[in-house]
Amino acid sequence: MADIVSFEKIKHKKKMATEDLIFTILNTTFLVLFAVVTLYPVLNTLAYSFNEGNDAVRGGIYLLPRKWSLRSYHEILFERPGIRVGAKVTVARTILGTLTSLAANALLSFILSRKKFLFKSGMSLFWIITMYASGGMIPVLVLFRYLHLTSSFWVYIIPGMVSAFNVMVMRTYMAGIPDSLEEAAQLEGAGYMRVFLSIISPLCKPVYATIALFVAVYHWNSWFDAMLYNRFDPQYTTLQYELMKLLDSVSATTGTTSGAQMSQAAAANTITPITVRAAATIATMAPIIALYPFLQRYFVTGLTIGGVKE
Amino acid sequence: MENSIVKSKRTKEVDINKPKLTAKEFKRQWILVAISAVYVIYGIIFYYLPLAGWIIAFQNFVFAKGIGGSKWVGIDKFKFLFSDKTFLMVIRNTFVMGVLNLFFSTVVAIAFAILLNEVKNKYFKKSIQTISYMPHFLSWIIVVAIVHDALTSTGIINDILMRLGIFKQPYAFLGDPKLFWGIVTLSHLWKETGWNAIIYLAAITSIDPCLYESASIDGAGRFQKMRYVTLPGLRPTIMILLLMNMGNVLNAGFELQYLLGNGLVQNVSRTIDIYILDWALDARNMDYSLGTAAGIFKTVVSMTFIVVSNYIAKKKGDERLF
C-alpha cells in the first residue's frame, strides 16, 4: 500500500517537472520576444539614420545600414537651424526647470511634513485639490496670455514648478525621517531653514534624485507647450517640437503613397528624407538611453517609495 | 508612490501634542507660515485662477475685450456642444480609447509581472525588466515615429506579412479607420507595459512567502499558485490603481491620437482634447469659450468617474481613495 502511494507521488512529481519545463521554455521565449519587440524599432531607427537617404526609401533595412552615410547627421547638426535652437532651449529648460522644480517641491514638502506646522491640513488639502480639479487647456492658455507668459521661455519653467503629485511623494519620504533629529538640531539652536538644508535634505538624496529624474525627462520630452504657447516664436522651439515637424513632413507622404512616388519626391527634395528624421530621433533619445543604465535604480525606488500596501 | 498619497491621507495622525494656534507657536514657526503664503499665492495663480476661468464658457469670450468686456451668452456654448455631431463623436472616441487602454494596460501589465516573477535566473529577469521600461522614457513623438516606421508600406509589419504571403500588396494600416483604436492600444502597450508592471512586481514581492509554501504543501502547482495566491495578493494594488486611473480615462487621449491621426481616420482618431485644441488654434474661427465648455465637460465627467468608482469600491469593501 505504502509503495503504491509513493509510486503515485513520483509520477505526480514527474508530471509536474515536465509541466514546469514546458512552462519555463514558453515563458522564456515569450519574454525574449517581448524584449526583441521593444528593442528592434530602436535599432532599426539607428540603422536608418546611418543609411544614405534615397537608398533608404526602398525599405528593406533591418539591423544594419545598406549604404553607409553620415549625411543625415551632418544635416541635422549643421543645416537645420531649428534643431540647433531647439537643442539649446531644451537643454536650458531641462537644467533650469529641474533645479527650480526640485527646490520648490522640496521646500513645500518640508513644510507639509512638519508635524507641528499650524496649517498642515489646510495646506495639504489646498494642494491635493489641484491634483484632481484642473481648469483645462483654454483657461490656462488665456491666463498665460494675460500674464505675458506666452511667447517666452519662462512658460516652460514657472507654471510647472510645483507639482502636488511630486510633493506628496517627497512629503511621505520626509515624514519617515525621525523627529528626534529635528528636535536635537533645534535644541542646538538651528532654525527651520537650517534643519531643512542641513538635516533633512542630505537624508533625502534618493527621493530628490528620483523626482529630479522624472522632472528632467518631462522637460526633455516636452513639445506640446512649445506648440501651444510659442509656435510663432522659433527662438523658443524645443527639440521634440522640431522632431514633430520632421515627423509631419515625412508622414504626409509615407502613409498613403507608394514607394516609387516617394523616391521621386525624395529625389526632388520635396520631403524630408526618412533618414534625417531617424537621425533626429536617435539624437533626441541618445541622452536618455546613455544615462538610462545609471539612473534606472532611482526610478524604481522612486515608484515604490512609500511602498505598496503591505 | 501613488499608494503613499492614499495612505498618508487615510491614517489620521494621532498627535498628542497637536499644535494649538497660539501667538507663541505662530512666532516660533513664522518662517514656515511666510513661505506657505508664497506657495498659496502661486497655487491660486496657476491652479485656482484657471478654475475661475471657467466663467468664460458662459460668454462669447474675445481675448482683446477681456472677461469684463465680452458678451454673456448663458449656456449657449453648451447647447451648441451637445448639438454638434463632431463633439458627440469625439466623446465616443475618447471614452472608447480610454477604456480600451485602461483595460488592456492593466491586464497585460499584471500578466507581464506574473510571468517575469516566475523567472528563476536573476540576470535574465533583471535584463528583461530593464529593457521593458525603457520605452516609458521616450517621448510620444518618438513612439509615433517608431509606430509609423513599422506600419508604412516599406515597414517591418508589411514586410513580414508579404513574406508570409498573407498580403500581396503593402497595406496602409494607418489609413484604415477600423484599425486605428487597435493601433493606439498597442502603441500604449509598447510604451508602458514594463513601466506599469513595476508596481505589480513590487506588490508580488511583498506577498508573504509562507502562503506559497503552504500552497505547495497542499499540492498546488505553479498555475494554481498564480491563480490562488499571487492574484488575490495583488487585488488591493489592482483596485487602487484602477481607481486612480478611472479619473484619467478621458485624459488618455491626446498626444498619441494627435500625432498618429490623419485625414483618413479622423472620425475615429479625434478626441475631446484635440477638439478643444482645434477651437483654440483655428485662426479664423477661434472660440475660447467653446473650448472651455468642452474642457468643463471633461473635468466634470472625470470627477464623477472617480467619485462613483470610489463609492462602488467602498460598498464592496475594497480599497478606496478617500
Image (cartoon, rainbow, N blue to C red):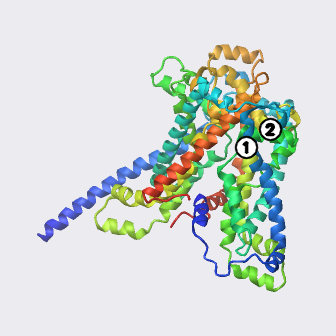
The residue tagged 1 is: A221
Residue A296: image quadrant is: bottom right
- Residue A31 pos. (x, y %): 49, 47
- Residue A202 pos. (x, y %): 76, 71
Q: Is residue B207 above or below residue B167?
A: below
What subunit carries mark 1? A
Work out which residue is located at the far bottom of the displayed protein and give it: A187
Q: B95 left or right of A176?
A: left
Q: Residue at x 73, y 77 (%)?
A: B20
**In front of the other: B282 or B71:** B71
Q: A220 left or right of B195?
A: right
Q: Which residue is drawn at 84% across and 38% down?
A: A145
Q: Is residue A266 above or below residue A118?
A: above
Q: Is mark 2 on a helix, strand or loop?
A: helix
Q: Residue at x 49, y 66 (%)?
A: B206
What subunit carries mark 2? A
Disc with the residue nearer the chain's start (2 vs 1): 2
